Amino acid sequence: MNGLQAYQRVNTQTSITDADPHKLIQLLYSGALERINMAKARMQAKDYAGKGKLITKAIEIVGGLRSFLDFDKGGELAAQLESLYEYMEQTLFEANAKNDVAKLDEVADLLRSIKSGWDGIREEASSLQQQAV
C-alpha cells in the first residue's frame, strides 16, 4: 500500500507542477469529489476519524476553489460561485457533524455540475483554437 500511496503522491505532484491554471481548477474539483466519495465510504464503515479527516480536506479544497475566484473579471458569476462554495463548506461541515450521507451527495452533485461546466470551457477553447489554425 505504501508504494501505491507514494506513486499517487508523485503523480499528483507532477500533475500539479505541469498544470495550467484551468487544469489546476479541474484537479481541485476532482480532488474534492474524491475526498467526498472516500468520506462516504469511511462514514458507512463507521470510521468517523477517517471520515472527519476526508471531509476536512474537502472543505479545504472548496476553500481553495474560492480563493481562485477573480471578482474583477468574474463579476456576478464569481459572486454567485463564492456563495455556492460557502454553502458547500457549510453543508460539508454539517455532513461531518451529523454523519449525513445525503449532505455529502448534495455537495458532490453541486461540484459535478460546476466541474462539468468548467470542463466544457476547456473543450470549447480547444475547438476555437483549432478552428483559428
Image (cartoon, rainbow, N blue to C red):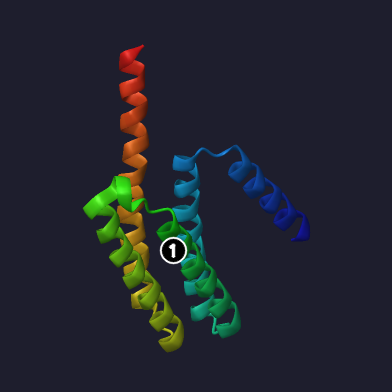
Q: Residue furthest top?
A: 133
| Amino acid found under the numbered disc labelled 1 | Val
Q: Residue at x 36, y 50 (%)?
A: 70
Q: Residue at x 74, y 54 (%)?
A: 6
Q: Residue at x 36, y 17 (%)?
A: 130
Q: Name the foreground residue: 49 vs 23.
A: 23
Residue 75, x across and y down, in percent:
25, 51
Q: Quadrant of residue 99?
A: bottom left
Residue 63, x across and y down, in percent:
45, 65
Q: Is residue 127 above or below residue 131?
A: below
Task: Classify mark 1: helix, strand or loop.
Answer: helix
Quadrant holding the C terminus: top left
Q: Residue furthest left?
A: 76
Q: Which residue is mark 1?
A: 62
Badge 1 crowding class, 10 Å Cα cut-off, few under 14, some 14 to 19, many 20 or more, is many
Horizontally, residue 125 falls left or right of residue 77, namely right
Q: Name the foreground residue: 38 vs 95.
A: 95
Horizontally, residue 23 falls left or right of residue 108, namely right
Quadrant holding the N terminus: bottom right
Residue 54, x across and y down, in percent:
55, 72
Q: Is residue 120 above or below residue 108?
A: above
